Amino acid sequence: MGGDQAPLRIVEGGLQALRESNNRFELVFVGRKEDVENEIAKHNSSGLRYSIKDAREVIEMHESPNAALKQKPDSSIAVGLNLHKEQNLDAVVSAGNTGAFMAASTLILGRLKGVSRPAVGTPLPTVKDVCFLIDSGANSDSRPQHILEFGLMGSIYATEILKKENPTVGLLNIGEESSKGNEMAQASFPLLEKSGLNFIGNIEGRDIFAGKADVVLADGFVGNIVLKFAESILPTLRSRFRSYASGNPFRAIRAAMAARTLRKVMKGFSYEATGGAPLLGVRGVSIIGHGSSTTIAVKNMVLRAEEMVNHNIAHLIESSISKMGAKAL
């Protein structure tokens, strides 16, 4: 029931994921049954593997996460995650209240052994292909051991899902030298050096889109600022493009000729391609979608969840942190 256009886009995207996957999995829509049924009735869903789990309450976008979870135990977020905890589901995706979904994922599913702080990871486009920013919003204040854990979790995700062999890991900082940055960054540097990760040192903001590192490490405060800035680029360029073309027929013709190329070039800046951001470090698969998720974004979010389940990402993270052990942590 979460998202700016729920359950409309959620249903459309879910059914589209089933069609494109040739029914490889069963999809469970969690929400007010009659609302979900009304949306499904608008589509040809014959033969698709889905079911509906009734959840009467909805956590609205403006509600306080912790208060909402306590006051609305029958929300689609809480019901879905409890089904996951009970192993009736293998993954949960949501475009609802981000804070509530992150809090509920951590509280209901629990943290993996050895993980101090679950973190949100977000793929970002680069001039090469894509990098993985972690943490992009779960933890405003992080300690060095948290940054180390982010590096390990991000490396596993980049290897298994983004198909990067021995991914490079960079610590986002204000300079390349190991002495640069605040106390947290300076203390994180030697831990990452000794970790066994493919750590290339500090990177600066300009290095992100240049693709200098496959995995970019930051605390959630800085990471979320970077993410929101990156998300603003595409709509800003669109606005400037329209402004350039308006009121001048010759400019309008030039803009029309360049429009297709521009769309192709800027496609990677759209969140639709990746669908959502995984919350790594919890006991399961939890993917956070944009509140404004489109049908395509929801479809890709579901397909990415399936991919994470098939690669057993949670188990790989837990076993890797265990192997790293006290030497690094």
Image (tube, rainbow, N blue to C red):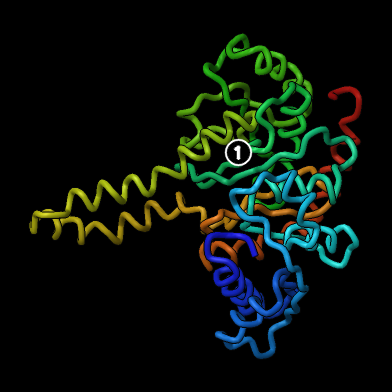
Residue 3 or 125: which is nearer the viewer?
Answer: 3
Which quarter of the rendered picture does the N terminus lie within? bottom right
Residue beneath the point at 73% across and 73% down? 27
Residue 159 visible = no
**What is the x, y in percent for residue 214?**
60, 38
**What is the x, y in percent for residue 83?**
84, 63
Residue at the far top: name it: 179
Which quarter of the rendered picture does the C terminus lie within? top right
Element marked by disc 1: strand
**What is the x, y in percent for residue 130?**
54, 46
Residue 90 visible = yes
Residue at the far bottom: name it: 46
Residue beneath the point at 76% across and 50% down? 69
Residue beneath the point at 69% across and 89% down? 47
**82 sits to left or right of 265:** right
Q: Quadrant of residue 12?
A: bottom right
**291 sits to left or right of 149:** left
Relative to 138, say whether 59 is above or below.
Answer: below
Residue 253 or 10: which is nearer the viewer?
Answer: 10
Residue beneath the point at 67% across and 42% down? 120
**What is the x, y in percent for residue 38?**
61, 82
Residue 274 or 169: which is nearer the viewer?
Answer: 274
What's the amino acid at mark 1?
Leu
Residue 201 or 141: which is nearer the viewer?
Answer: 141
**89 sits to left or right of 205:** right
**304 sits to left or right of 226:** right
Q: Quadrant of residue 22?
A: bottom right
Residue at the far front: name it: 71
Q: Residues within 10 Å of mark 1 (few under 14, many from 20)?
A: many
**Tally of numbered tags:** 1
Relative to 248, say whether 149 is above or below.
Answer: above
Q: Which residue is mark 1?
A: 133
